[in-house]
Amino acid sequence: MKEPHNYAQVGYSMILVSASLAVVGLLALFMADDVLFADNIQRDATAHFNECKLNDFVPDDCVKYRDRINNEISGIYVDPAKWE
């Protein structure tokens, strides 16, 4: 009768898992210059939105926010006549 255990496949799987973890570790090591990279992007985007909000979304770089305001969910109401 055939041996029901597959020790070789399990061993190869363990080697594959450890290699992938080593690759993830090396990527983290090289990318760890700025661990708050995503946080900095979010803070910059929030600061830009707040600056646009103070200017009533009139500048050209604030156009992308215009479709998200003037509704009950956002709670931000601006007169669209200012944009023309």
Image (cartoon, helix red, strand yellow):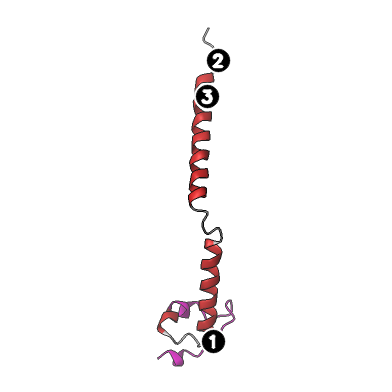
Q: Distance between the residues labelled 1 and 2?
A: 71 Å
Decide which of 74, 40 is in the foreground and name it.
40
Which x, y percent locates residue 25? Answer: 52, 44
Nearer the N terminus, badge 3 or badge 1?
A: 3
The answer to whether residue 70 of the structure is visible from this angle is no
Question: Which residue is at a point 48% across and 85% down the rendered structure image?
Answer: 57
Find residue 46 and report its image quarter.
Answer: bottom right
Residue 41 lies, in percent from the top left, at 51, 67
Residue located at (48% from left, 41% from top) = 23
Mark 3: few, some, or many residues within 10 Å (few <14, many ≥20)? few
Residue that numbered label 2 is attached to:
4
Secondary structure, mark 3, is helix
Q: Which residue is pictured at 53% across the width and 84% down the height?
A: 53
Nearer to us: label 3 or label 2? 3
Q: Residue 11 carries which label?
A: 3
Q: Which amino acid does label 2 sit on?
A: Pro
- Residues at discs 3 and 1 in contact (Cβ within 8 Å): no
Q: Residue 54 carries which label?
A: 1
Q: Which residue type does callout 1 highlight?
A: Leu
